[in-house]
């Protein structure tokens, strides 16, 4: 299943005892009306704050503020490929579509981490 071309936003389950990425897709029901549905829930690091999607690499990136990491998720099989240590307090991730690099703002450390 190739989910990322139509995955516009990855939601974060906040206030949960098990932080996770909530993958949401849009589609059409039997009456051709648009709908939104949960595809899967993927465990990630502590205190997830934001997510970004690279549709060309079929990956999602989740900033985990409580564990100072970014979870890299494979969109083809819904598994965490890697958990990458970054600076203190990662809160936001942004994609450079030309280079496929992710930029992570680390608010407590006053740094930016760049993931290749």
Image (spheres, rainbow, N blue to C red):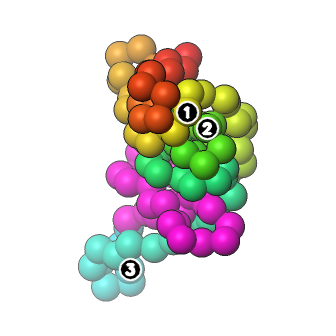
Residue at 52% x, 66% y is 13
Q: Nearer the viewer, residue 91 or 102?
A: 91
Crowding around mark 3 (Cα neighbors within 10 Å: few <14, some 14 to 19, many 20+) is few
Residue 111 lies in the magenta stretch: no
Crowding around mark 1 (Cα neighbors within 10 Å: few <14, some 14 to 19, many 20+) is many
- For the residues labelled 3 and 2, the Cα–Cα distance comes to 40 Å
Q: Position of residue 38 (x, y in %)?
A: 51, 71
Is disc 1 placed on a helix, strand or loop?
A: loop
Q: Earlier in the sequence, mark 3 or mark 2?
A: 3
Residue at 66% x, 29% y is 85
Residue 12 lies in the magenta stretch: yes
Q: Mark 3 points at which residue?
A: 29
**Are the residues flagged by discs 2 and 1 in contact, CB closer than 8 Å?**
yes
Number of marks in picture: 3
Q: Position of residue 4 (x, y in %)?
A: 47, 46
Q: Earlier in the sequence, mark 3 or mark 1?
A: 3
The image shows residue 75, relative to residue 95, as above or below, that is below
Per the rendered image, the range of residues in magenta is 1-26
> Residue 82 is drawn in which quadrant?
top right
Crowding around mark 2 (Cα neighbors within 10 Å: few <14, some 14 to 19, many 20+) is many
């Amino acid at each position: 299943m190739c989910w990322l071309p139509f995955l516009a936003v990855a939601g974060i389950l906040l206030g949960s005892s098990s932080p996770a990425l909530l993958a949401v897709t849009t589609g059409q029901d039997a009456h051709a009306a648009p709908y939104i549905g949960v595809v899967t829930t993927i465990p990630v690091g502590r205190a997830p704050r934001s997510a970004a999607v690279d549709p060309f690499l079929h990956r999602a990136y989740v900033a985990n503020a409580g564990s100072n990491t970014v979870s890299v998720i494979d969109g083809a099989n819904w598994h965490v490929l890697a958990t990458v240590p970054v600076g203190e307090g990662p809160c936001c991730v942004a994609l450079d579509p030309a280079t496929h690099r992710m930029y992570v703002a680390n608010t407590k450390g006053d740094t930016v981490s760049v993931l290749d």
